[in-house]
Amino acid sequence: GTQHHQYNGTTMSSTTTHEVHLAIYDLSMGMARGLSAQFLGPQHAVEIIPHTAILAYGKEYFFGQGIEWCNPHEFRAARGIHPIEIQSLGRTDCTERQFEDWCRAQAANGSFGTTSFDFFHRN
């Protein structure tokens, strides 16, 4: 949230920021390269079958039936997968409520609804 501090008679605003990370999963659990090389040839092997999620506010946000979120440990335990890489995306001053309202709006307008999944562009 926003905090206000008095400093020499003037009000200064400082905004709380939140870390944001990208979790990258391999849905094939390491099997994509070997299997794809068999079918497509070694020069066309697919390294991973990616799934990505945003980590922020102590939650994991992912595209499932629209944009969904839960505790990262619950997500991983339920699916039996763990990220192969986590990258820092920086910090945001967006509140958890603002972000989740945005997620709901994206589902409502069809941008990230239940039928808008696309392996290459929205996954």
Image (cartoon, helix red, strand yellow):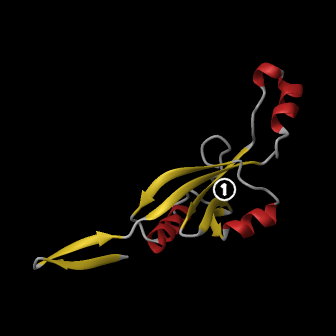
Estimate the x, y position of residue 22 in percent, counting from the top left.
58, 52
Instruction: Give the residue drawn at x 60%, y 68%.
Output: 59
The answer to which quarter of the image holds residue 43 is top right
Estimate the x, y position of residue 11 in percent, counting from the top left.
17, 77
Instruction: Give the residue drawn at x 79%, y 66%.
Output: 77
Badge 1 is on which residue?
115
Give the amino acid at mark 1.
Thr
Estimate the x, y position of residue 54 in percent, counting from the top left.
58, 58
| Residue extending furthest toward the front | 8
Can residue 111 be seen here?
Answer: no
41 to the left or right of 90 = right
Can residue 74 be seen here?
Answer: yes
- The N terminus is located in which quarter? bottom left
In the image, residue 85 sits, relative to residue 47, either above or below, namely below
Secondary-structure class at tag 1: loop
Instruction: Give the residue drawn at x 84%, y 26%.
Output: 37
In the image, residue 118 sits, relative to residue 43, either above or below, namely below
Estimate the x, y position of residue 119 in percent, counting from the top left.
68, 44
The answer to which quarter of the image holds residue 112 is bottom right
Mark 1 is surrounded, within 10 Å at the Cα level, by few (under 14), some (14 to 19) or many (20 or more) other residues, namely few
26 to the left or right of 71 = right
Instruction: Give the residue drawn at x 51%, y 58%.
Output: 20
Counting the numbered discs, the total is 1
In the image, residue 48 sits, relative to residue 66, either above or below, namely above
4 to the left or right of 62 = left
Q: Nearer the viewer, residue 45 or 21?
A: 21
